[in-house]
Image: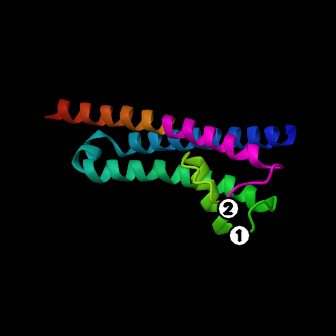
């Protein structure tokens, strides 16, 4: 159990760090693009913004899937990705399960996914609010 907690905590730290880097990069890109360009291409800009955040989640899901595959808990990459996606999004279908040796990781991954999706949602609303605020100031 302690090894699961240690490995799970390490992956949580890694994915939180990567998520923070991703959101920071998005902010830097949005600043570089500038309010005028974002206003001109608002639907396209916001769509790319959402896609960038989604991409960060995909990378995080792949990291968890790689662990399940690496330790031999799930024997195909497709199964590992399916299980990881199901756990990360907290859907948890239950058609694939981990053995007792590794099952605590799926709970840790679910908590990790819930927190990162919450962070992304707050980020989306805050950036969206700022973009639309700038649009209304410009008109």
Residue in view at x 70 percent, y 55 percent: 97
Q: Residue 62: give x, y in percent of width and height.
A: 63, 57
> In the figure, 17 relative to 137: above or below?
below
Q: Is residue 132 left or right of residue 88?
A: left
Q: Is the residue 133 above or below the residue 89 in the image? A: above
The percent coordinates of residue 31 (x first, y second) are: 40, 39
Left or right: 39 as drawn, with respect to 83 = left
What x and y, as percent, mark residue 12? 69, 40
Q: Residue at x 57, y 38 (%)?
A: 20
Q: Is residue 74 left or right of residue 124?
A: right
Quarter of the picture containing the C terminus is top left
* Res 131 label: none
Residue 76 image label: 1
Residue labelled with disc 2: 80
**Residue 105 in magenta stretch:** yes
Magenta segment includes 39: no
């Amino acid at each position: 159990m302690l090894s699961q907690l240690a490995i799970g905590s390490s992956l949580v730290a890694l994915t939180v760090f990567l998520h923070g880097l991703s959101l920071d990069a998005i902010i830097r890109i949005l600043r570089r693009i500038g309010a005028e360009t974002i206003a001109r291409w608002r639907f396209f800009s916001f769509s790319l913004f959402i896609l960038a955040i989604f991409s960060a989640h995909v990378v995080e899901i792949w990291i968890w899937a790689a662990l399940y595959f690496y330790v031999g808990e799930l024997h195909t990459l497709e199964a590992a990705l399916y299980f990881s996606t199901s756990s990360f999004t907290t859907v948890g279908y239950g058609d694939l399960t981990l053995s007792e040796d590794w099952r605590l990781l799926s709970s840790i991954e679910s908590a990790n996914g819930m927190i990162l999706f919450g962070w992304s949602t707050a980020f989306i609303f805050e950036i969206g609010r700022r973009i639309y605020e700038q649009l209304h100031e410009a008109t």
